[in-house]
């Protein structure tokens, strides 16, 4: 009994330490704690963390992460995968924002958006595909006559 209590206290301190560095989703926290502690201990600690409101709501956490990733010009595909790994809900898809982010990447990488030869255009297309932008968005951003 005392050994379980000791493990619980250790897990609780560890949870506090983890959450002091950055916010975590419930799924993410459960995964981290499961590496060191028993299933029963993890369940108890998560219950306490929720009761004490140590965890941010999933919607708010999702919005914060999405905003941060939008600022870094990450594609919708990247954001979607990132949030799914954390078990968080997806925000609304914004086509205009995706177009703007892909343009920002082109300006950063190629210093232009208008391409005068097919080779540069193909490089730009491949670059955006690699970054996770959808073909529909790439068609909107790159010159239509050359694709």
Image (spheres, grey):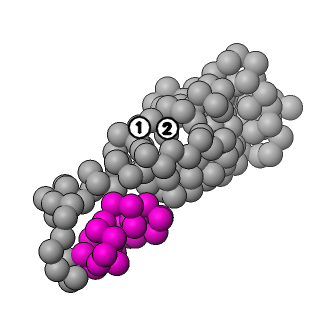
Q: Residue furthest right?
A: 1
Residue 76 in percent (x, y) is at: 49, 53
In the image, what residue occupies the spot 73% across and 24% down? 50
In the image, what residue occupies the spot 22% across and 82% down? 118
Label 2: few (<14), some (14–19) or many (≥20) C-alpha neighbours in 10 Å: some
Is residue 132 part of the magenta span, yes or no?
Answer: yes
Residue 47 in percent (x, y) is at: 78, 27
Is residue 62 part of the magenta span, yes or no?
Answer: no
**Span colored in magenta:** 121-147
Q: Which residue is mark 2?
A: 65
Q: Which residue is mark 1?
A: 68
Q: For this view, does 135 lie left or right of residue 42?
A: left
* Prevailing secondary structure of the magenta residues: helix
The answer to which of 60 and 35 lies nearer the viewer is 60
142 vs 69: above or below: below
11 vs 51: above or below: below
The answer to which of 61 and 119 lies nearer the viewer is 119
- Kindly indicate whether the residue at mark 1 contacts the one at mark 2 (C-beta within 8 angstroms): yes
Q: Is residue 111 visible?
A: yes
Residue 23 in percent (x, y) is at: 53, 31
Q: Is residue 36 visible?
A: no
Q: For this view, does 34 lie left or right of residue 108?
A: right
């Amino acid at each position: 009994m005392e050994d379980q209590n000791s493990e619980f206290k250790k897990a609780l301190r560890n949870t506090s330490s983890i959450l002091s560095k950055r916010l975590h989703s419930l799924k993410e926290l459960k995964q981290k704690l499961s590496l060191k502690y028993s299933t029963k201990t993890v369940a108890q600690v998560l219950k306490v963390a929720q009761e004490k409101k140590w965890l941010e709501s999933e919607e708010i956490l999702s919005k914060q992460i999405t905003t941060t990733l939008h600022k870094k010009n990450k594609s919708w595909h990247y954001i979607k995968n990132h949030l799914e790994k954390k078990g968080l809900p997806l925000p609304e898809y914004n086509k205009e924002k995706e177009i703007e982010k892909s343009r920002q990447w082109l300006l950063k990488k190629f210093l232009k958006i208008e391409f005068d030869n097919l080779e540069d255009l193909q490089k730009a297309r491949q670059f955006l595909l690699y970054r996770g932008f959808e073909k529909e968005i790439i068609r909107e951003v790159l010159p239509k006559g050359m694709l």
